[in-house]
Amino acid sequence: MLRLVFFAPALLLVLLFVAYPVFATIGVSLFSSDGSFVGFGNYGTVLGSPDTANLNGFPKPPPYGTLIHNAIWIGIHLPLSLFLGLWLALVLRDVKGASWIKTAIFIGMVTPLIVGGILMLYLYDGNIGVVPSFFNLIGVQSLATGWLQHPVTLLFGLIFGSVWLWTGFSLIVYSAGLTTIPKDYWEAAKVDGTSTFRMFTRVTFPLLKPMTIVVITMTILWELKIFDLVFGATNPQGGVGGAADVLGLQMYRYAFVQLPANVGAAAAVATFLSILTMVATVATLRYMVKR
Amino acid sequence: MKLRLRSIVIHVFAWALAIAWLFPFVGLLMASFRPIPEIIGGWWNFGQFSPTLDKFGSAFSKIGTGLGNSVLIAVPGTLIPMFVATLAGYGFARFSFPVRDYLFLTIVLLMTIPQQMVAIPIFRIMLGLGLANTVSSLILLHSAWGLPWIILFMRNFISSLPKEVEEAARVDGASDFKVFFRIVLPMALPALGAVAVLQFMWVWNDFFFAVLLCPATVSCMPATVALIRTIGRFEFDPGLLAAGSVLVMLVPVAMYAVLQRYYIRGMVGWTIKG
């Protein structure tokens, strides 16, 4: 019975400040602002709202709604950061001073994301930013202006910026993964005359499967939860016309910015977001818990 | 010969990429210590170059309290969950009881929940406890929020430790607590180093909880919120904001530079067995 003491403080804190609030939020999501029970009404309102999904008249510039923006975020950011990190991990094996390069790329991972958002203001600024200047240099005038002031470049600029911040993660995970593969594997394949590409698809990539799974899960969670970056680079509305609005920001705005607040809708957004993160994680849970 | 050329190309490319990767940070740094008119058209123009630390001085006077609050929140917000979670992690690794695995799995699942999922009730609880707009509310919340991942991390680590020493101590009549404090805790120190740097960084970098529980009160506001609220982004002085941003990111980046191996161990520890 004394062994309960090992668990008691942790359980108490988790119950009070994590588990209970989770269920309380589900409860809140079932009521309207005036306190009457509406069942799943808030979910219907939120999912039907143009704030969440707004594809009428597509193709058109953003805003497409928070859910679509998060989906676009995953669609672009996941493959780019994953393969960029993997490819760098492979290339850097043969580079002198690779640990310095990894350190440089990983700085994005330790930077507060709110600062990451503020960085976007400087990076994409029409007067002092590197990115517009670069496009000015190569003569693409349409991209040589301030990116954050236009809906299309705002959304995609922030997504590319988040790739820059996050690639360090897949680089570090894959680099560590590569050190666990015995050199004999590649040498044997080399003796057989296997091409570099076949070596990658048949030997290296399959052996890195556990790392790939972790990178995919963590990256999707990060993309779904993205908040600080958008808040730092824009405003509680998600920038011009809400072009960079995301689910996390939508929840915050409904509950804590807009007047009158709509906590029911905010809780519905939060619950919906949590369901998405759960789905993304359940598949990988068994890889994270050691037996 | 062909091989050497290939190697040179790879080296040039890799190093160029690493330098380009740092450009956005360099841009922020330039905006923080050069007058803005001087860098219009690009910070890489050095025709006029008059660096000054003025902006850092005024940024510090605006967010100095915030930086202090961040320390006040992040230090206990790291130590408390480390201790509490190591106790529980040890329990999950070594004691068996009926619902253990379900309980453990539930706690791990809570790790994936977004902060938004607890925001509204947490706000109400803290208001009810009279802790709204205090540093304590953030310490409490971060302590609880860090528990699931630290419990998972420590349980995985402790499971991989040999049981023999603990068993020998038990035979000699040591209690559970004696075993924990004298044997397990010292052996867990390398893992605790990784936990400490990551948890500290996450608490320091947090913005959502901070703006939830302390949106406008200077006495509790950590640096990440102070940056937005007291310097601001709109009626704004770009040099000041850049200097403030540099100050806020300085702590996690410097810590990373010094304690790098712990970060890697923490980030990678649970992806690679052994």
Image: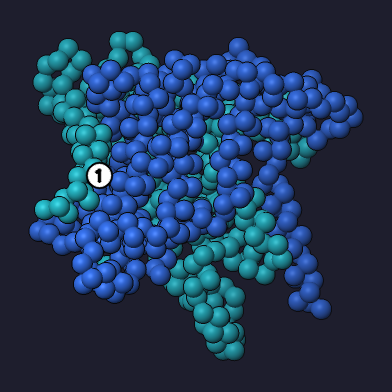
Chain colours: A cyan, B blue
Q: Is residue A254 above or below residue B256?
A: above
Name the kind of residue labelled 1 in the image: Ala
Q: Please give the chain letter of the residue carrying mark 1.
A: A
Residue B163 vs residue B254, the one in the foreground: B163
Q: Position of residue B197 (x, y in %)?
A: 49, 47
Residue A116 location, quadrant: top right
Q: Residues within 10 Å of mark 1 (few under 14, many from 20)?
A: many
In the image, farthest residue toward the front: B172
Q: Is residue A140 above or below residue B62?
A: below
Is B52 left or right of A236, judged from the image as shown?
right
Residue A125 location, quadrant: top right
Q: Is residue A193 above or below residue A84?
A: below
Camera sees residue B48: yes
Which quadrant does the C terminus of chain A fall into?
bottom left
Residue under the point 18% across and 58% down: B101
Q: How many marks?
A: 1
Q: Position of residue B147 (x, y in %)?
A: 31, 45
Residue under the point 34% across and 47% down: B83
Residue A64 vs residue B181, the one in the foreground: B181
In the image, farthest residue toward the bottom: A191
Residue under the point 37% across and 47% down: B82
Residue B165 location, quadrant: bottom left
Camera sees residue A213: no
Residue under the point 57% across and 52% down: B259
Residue A15 vs residue A168, the one in the foreground: A15
Q: Position of residue B12 (x, y in %)?
A: 76, 60
* Residue picked out by circle 1: A10
